[in-house]
Image: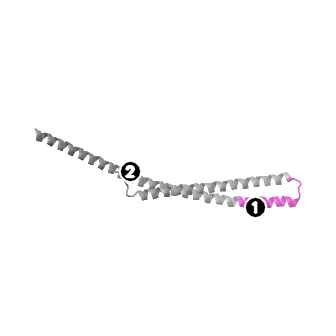
Amino acid sequence: MKFKYMYQKVVDLKSNEKTQAEWMLSAAIGELQTEQLTLNKLIEDKTRATHAMLSEGASSMLRLQELQRYVEHLDRCIKNKLCDIKCAETNVEHKQSQLSTRMLDEKVWLKAKEKAKAGFEQQILLREQNELDEMATIRFAMKAQRV
C-alpha cells in the first residue's frame, strides 16, 4: 500500500509560492544592484566634471558655468538615485519578509505531511504485526489440536 497525502496539492502550492517568492526577491536584488551601479556612474561623472572644472584653470567663464550647471544636475540626479536606492532596499526587505513567510508556510505543510506519513507507516506496521500475531495464534491452535 502506497502513502498518498490528501493535502499534497496544498504542499505543492506552498512550494510554488516559495519558489515564486525567491524569484521576486532575486528580481528585487537585481533592481537594487542596477540602481547602485547607476549611482556609482553618476558619482564618477560628477568626479570627472569637478576635476575638469578645477583643471580648466584659465578657461572661459562660459565653460566653467556650463560645468557648474552639469555638476549641479548630477547632484540632483545623485539625490534622486539615493531615494531610488532607499526604495529598492525597502522592496528587497519586503521581498525577504515574504520569502520568510512562504518558507515557514511550506515548512509547516511539509512537517504535517511527514507526520501523516509516519502515522501511515505506523498503521502499516501495526497491521502487519497483527497479521503475524494472528498467523502465530492459528499455528499454535493447530499444534494444540494435534496433540
Q: Position of residue 8 (x, y in %)?
A: 41, 56
Amino acid on which disc 2 is placed: Glu
Residue 135 in which image quadrant = top left
Identify which residue, 56 or 40, lies in the foreground: 40
Identify the magenta region.
56-77
Residue at 24% over, 44% down:
132
Identify which residue, 22 or 137, lies in the foreground: 137
Classify 10 Å Cα crowding around label 2: few (below 14), some (14-19), many (20 and above): few
Q: Position of residue 114 (x, y in %)?
A: 38, 50
The verdict on residue 71 being magenta is yes
The residue that label 1 is drawn on is 73
Amino acid on which disc 1 is placed: His
Q: Is residue 46 left or right of residue 143?
A: right
Farthest residue to the front: give it: 146
The verdict on residue 93 being magenta is no
Q: Which quadrant of the figure contains the C terminus?
A: top left
Position of residue 132 relative to residue 52, above or below, is above
Q: Is residue 94 left or right of residue 77?
A: left
Position of residue 1 relative to residue 70, above or below, is above
On residue 93, the disc is none
Farthest residue to the top: give it: 147
Q: Is residue 26 left or right of residue 108?
A: right
Give the distance between the C-alpha atoms of the residues marked 2 and 1, in whole angstroms. 60 Å
Q: Position of residue 37 (x, y in %)?
A: 68, 53
The residue that label 2 is drawn on is 114
Classify 10 Å Cα crowding around label 1: few (below 14), some (14-19), many (20 and above): few
| Residue 36 in view (yes/no) | yes
Residue at 14% over, 42% down:
142
| Residue 97 in view (yes/no) | no
Residue at 86% over, 59% down:
63
For marks 2 and 1 on the same chain, the one whose residue lies earlier in the sequence = 1
Secondary element at tag 1: helix
